[in-house]
Amino acid sequence: MPAKKDLYELGEIPPLGHVPEKMYASVLRPCRYGAPATAYEMEVMDVPELGPRQVMINVMAAGVNYNGVWTSLAKPIDMIAARQKYGDPHDFHIGGSEGSGVVWAVGSEVKDLQVGDHVMVSPCHWDEHAYDIRMGIDPIASKSTKVWGFEDNFGCFAQFSVVDDFQCFRKPENLTFEQAASVFVSFATAYRQLTGWAPHVVRPGDPILIWGGAGGLGTAAIQIVREFGGRGIAVVSSPEKADFCMSLGAAGTIDRRDFNHWGRMPEVGGEGFDEWQRGVRDFGKAFWEVLGAKQNPWIVFEHSGQDTMPTSIFICENGGMIVTCGATSGYNLDIDARVLWMRLKRLQGSHFASLRQCQEVVNLLGQERLDPLLAKTWDFPEIGQAHQVMHDNAHPPGNMAVVVNAPERALKQLKV
Ligand code: NAP
């Protein structure tokens, strides 16, 4: 058995259940805010304390997603300053909103998890006793809800992390820790967008427009649409990405570089509006062509935001839904309101997923009906670089993870 120490090197596994005082973490500080490549630095930090309904995770791998990009840029808000405003004493941020690892300690009131369990950790947590939750609100919409490692400090870009017990889901054996770390933000969010807003759910034969088809959300969405029998048309920006989307089961692809009406919508009826509308119509025709039928999308899967939302509103089928969870290109979403109300279209906000939806996604991954599509695994000191590549839209199609404490093979050797 390895000796007990106050700090372990990366990849060095302490005796099962021994929690050291210190840990390596990838840390953001206000003085380094800016490009992700230089904002993250590895530092030795205190291991966070465990609460009664919490679980200490020995983090094996962490997912790379946009939360880590927004936090390093301090856009749209400076998370450290936002927390300090409410009395938080810490002047640093440890990010990482999805991860996987081994349960290393459990709080006194935790019943369903034990030291040694292999888990994947979801990002959202809330106060189960919050008044609005007791009144029946969807916990994701609760005032008490926070995203771990984003709105909250002490995420999984560290050797150890403390999470609420309900954030943990048992890792299916067919997933490596790296795969398991990288799926929740993409897959569970896409799953809720496409199945969670009845009656606007994917049904067999439904045409669905998927923006950013080769990205984390997009590759998840293509697979979910395929599994529910829909026809997903993916928007991409290169022939390679188009091929990748087709290999996942997209019914067709559109290259957004063939159009130039992107960005904010001109004043309705004003200068440039007619030309802008022609661009939208051409895009709509391209959708029909690749679909092979004059049908508009029943669901428009949005997250690209300012550049695409005006088109999404127009192109959506009458009575259909535009469902959005993000705005990569900007937050000012222009809408021709006439189209929304006269055509009875639904514009739905959607944020992450319920615990049940998370479990359903884990089940589908465990049954190998969904492929986690881990495209690249980075080493821990490369966290900044991994987020820089994502920020620059230069990342490979699919999802990315960072190895934290141990790659899968080392863990197997240690038989943890
Ligand atoms: P991603 O892997 O970078 O994929 C996004 C894709 O969008 C890119 O591959 C890119 O594909 C496309 N894109 C980029 N800029 C665009 C533009 N101006 N117009 C049209 N398409 C554009 O990111 P992701 O993980 O899928 O996340 C996407 C967004 O959703 C982020 O803003 C993220 O913060 C948000 N999000 C929110 C939640 C939530 O729970 N609320 C969860 C996950 C993600 P092409 O260049 O090939 O078109």
Image (cartoon, grey):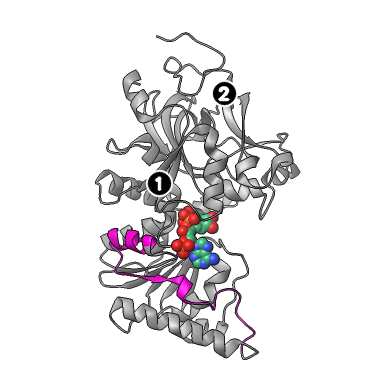
| Rendering coords of residue 17 (x, y %) | 44, 18
Badge 2 or badge 1: first in the primary sequence: 2
Q: Answer yes or no: is residue 35 visible.
A: yes
Q: Quadrant of residue 301?
A: bottom left
Q: Quadrant of the C terminus?
A: top left
Seen in the picture, residue 151 relative to 16 is either above or below; the reply is below
Left or right: where 88 falls relative to 216: right
Q: Are marks 2 and 1 in contact (CB under 8 Å)?
A: no
Q: Callout 2, which amino acid?
A: Met
Q: In the depicted view, which residue is nearer to us: 253 or 186?
A: 253
The residue depicted at 58 percent of the width and 69 percent of the height is 306
The residue depicted at 61 percent of the width and 75 percent of the height is 264
Label 2 to label 1, Cα distance in Å? 25 Å
Residue 237 lies in magenta, yes or no?
Answer: no
Q: Residue furthest front?
A: 239
Q: Quadrant of residue 90?
A: top right
